[in-house]
Image (cartoon, coloured by chain):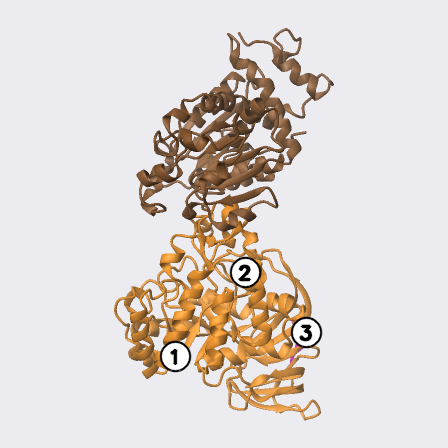
Amino acid sequence: MRLLIANGYLIDPSQGVKAGRNLLIEDGRVAGILNYSDDVPEGAEVFDAAGLIVAPGFIDLHVHLREPGQEYKETIATGAAAAVAGGWTSVCAMPNTDPVNDNAAVTRFIIEQAERAQLANVFPIGAITKGSRGEELAEMGEMREAGVVAVSDDGRPVPSAGMMRRAMEYARGFDLPVVDHCEDRSLAADGVMHEGVWSLRLGLRGIPALAEELDAWRDCALAELTGARVHLAHVSTRGAIEAVRRAKERGLSVTCEVTPHHFTLTDEAVEGYDTNTKMNPPLRSRDHVQAILDALSDGTIDAIATDHAPHHADEKALEFDRAPFGITGLETAIGLAFDRLVHRGIIGLDRLVELCSTNPARIFKLEGRGTLRPGAWGDVTILDPNLRWTFDARRSRSKSRNTPFDGWTFQGAAVATIVAGRVLYTHPSLEDRRRAIA
Amino acid sequence: MFTRKDLLGIRYLSAEEITHLLDVAESFRDISQREIKKVPALRGRTVINLFFEPSTRTRTSFEIAAKRLSADTINISAAASSVVKGETLLDTARNLEAMSPDLLVIRHPSAGAPHMLARVCRAGVINAGDGANEHPTQALLDALTIRQHKGRIAGLKVTIVGDILHSRVARSNVYLLTKLGAEVCLTGPGTLIPQPFGDLVERGVRLEEKIERALEGADVVMVLRIQRERQNAAFFPSLREYAVHYGLNLKRLERAAPDAIVLHPGPINRGIEIASEVADGSRSLILDQVANGLAVRMAVLYLLLGGGVLRPDGEGEANREAALISEESGSGLGKVDR
């Protein structure tokens, strides 16, 4: 099986390629980068990418697929479908399922379900502690063998520095990055939005920025002590970014990701009490959003990840303080990245590819991903920087609709998603771009 | 002048709307002084009081206000409703809505609950207190009381003492008083007056941790209830210490202007946030507040149900409202319901 992605503009930061080239995929792997003038290989299906950007497949380091246990919110199949519709060829699934992915059996189940779905690649993330209770280490070695690519107690962050230290020391032995949702629970208390003038104005309990910042500094200090690979999930505060910046200056193995909603919205969006503006970490004030934009621009932030967190409509149709945290994000992330970052001059196109593909593959050491080198997986995301489109949540592939971006119009989109040489998604604007060459 | 469907908070109102509400409330005060305390203004209208938190004063006040305007009223409290069976707020609202009420008066522990109702209901929604967000009719009755005694709001120095953080009364009052040009000073223990309160509105609010300094020259002192039910959150060490350091007693009150008035939204904790000699003293207007609460709620019910825009007689609004309170008037509204 051969697929030639022809006439596109290739951007692959992993090998410094930024030029008009054809990309040949054979039997699921990259076979080569060809010049436009080269002959079309025999029997290849041709995907005409003229006017489009061809990038190594995008990798989302942070999603919640809810299976096993909460299939009414999302399944691995529906989540993976939403992923490819949003331009993601791979997603990394957080372990806060029911049961928690804290052992190899659950890990294997997730991988099997993903194989059955035949959509985006799904890389499970294992729990740091059993049941994510923060008490005893989970069986990281077993899970590693079964296929987890990182460990995290996302959503129930490890409260004790002592436990986190042991987790980092232990994970290092299996070369697993430790992903932390930074949140000091004693400071966050039972807050439901960012603590600031808007939380006071709306009468909602606040989560101070310091709750994240304090844990970020702690994790960076522990990274230095233990030498572990540490990745800070969804950083949302000036202080957490500053902690990562300092850690990088000191040469520590610390990376971080940011979500599209945190670089797009501020806490002011909570006015009106729409529960689709409730997530953790919460939408922050303008000053923090500016710090995120600066860090995206200067390279401190390594990755864009969605924190896709589907919830059933009934669960979100509650009073603000009673509704669960989280929003979906797989299908709007790239639109937001173009609209809010690329078209506003915050980042360039190659940086976009780094943030969504090259760096995520490097952070979780995903072999043969995030690159279009010959021999790598034939995972490709095709981008149209100028397509104007409107997101309609009712047509989302996800089982859930909890998004604040319903009805938003974006300039720029992922218009085709190719996993191991199979074209799994094409935007309607590309209907006639594919043809088989006899 | 007042064409809103809902009253969700003072934050959304203009100074003109607030003044108009107060003027109409003023005109309603007399009704409660009459022998026959009822006018047919809202005859045939249905008002549902939906209370998810305990309340005597506010619920009774709304109920009497509606009845004096001849509306039919129904009270639903959370303990007696389907909430205990697990029904969601939206389902409760939809079911009530199916019975075609004209207004829903809601008190709820979650900030924003009335906003949610207002989005899905055709009926108007009145916020009777939502979590720590707003309690608009309380601020209106406080303002009416201040206006009666001071003749104005603009330029007054108003000091609010106590648990500002958890107080919907404080928020509504800050919005209202600053919109009408008063200078507001917030004071209390550092744990209960977070710094960003200074930026709550564009101008007119300052924070002061020393109560003595905050009271200096105040024209109005508003004392907030210490919410004993929130004690477990440990915002201050003990009620005793609170009373000593932040309670309003006669000695502290001496720092305020000589003709300063004292307000409290009730229910009061005697000897904690307010000393009995202040609560029962000549400057205390606590009972005036209750009486004004009735007038304000009548005005709100009346205006939300079209009183401010319907002009069947083709005459000016002011005339119409004058007619409303005049028993001799030929207008149907003015007739006493016998």
Residue A3 in the image: above or below residue B237: below
What residue would you read off at disc 2? A396
Give residue A390's quadrant in the image. Answer: bottom right
Which amino acid type is shown beneath numbered disc 2? Answer: Ser
For the colour orange, the matching chain is: A
Which amino acid type is shown beneath numbered disc 3? Answer: Asp
Q: Earlier in the sequence, mark 2 or mark 3?
A: 2
A283 or B95: nearer the viewer: A283
Label 2: how many Cα within 10 Å (few below 14, some 14–19, many 20+): many
Q: Chain of mark 1?
A: A
Q: Earlier in the sequence, mark 1 or mark 3?
A: 1
Kindly check if marks 1 and 3 are in contact, taking CB atoms under 8 A apart as contact.
no
What residue would you read off at disc 3? A432
Which amino acid type is shown beneath numbered disc 1? Answer: Glu
Q: Chain of mark 2?
A: A
Q: What quarter of the picture does the N terminus of chain B occupy? A: top right
What x and y, as percent, mark residue B104?
50, 31
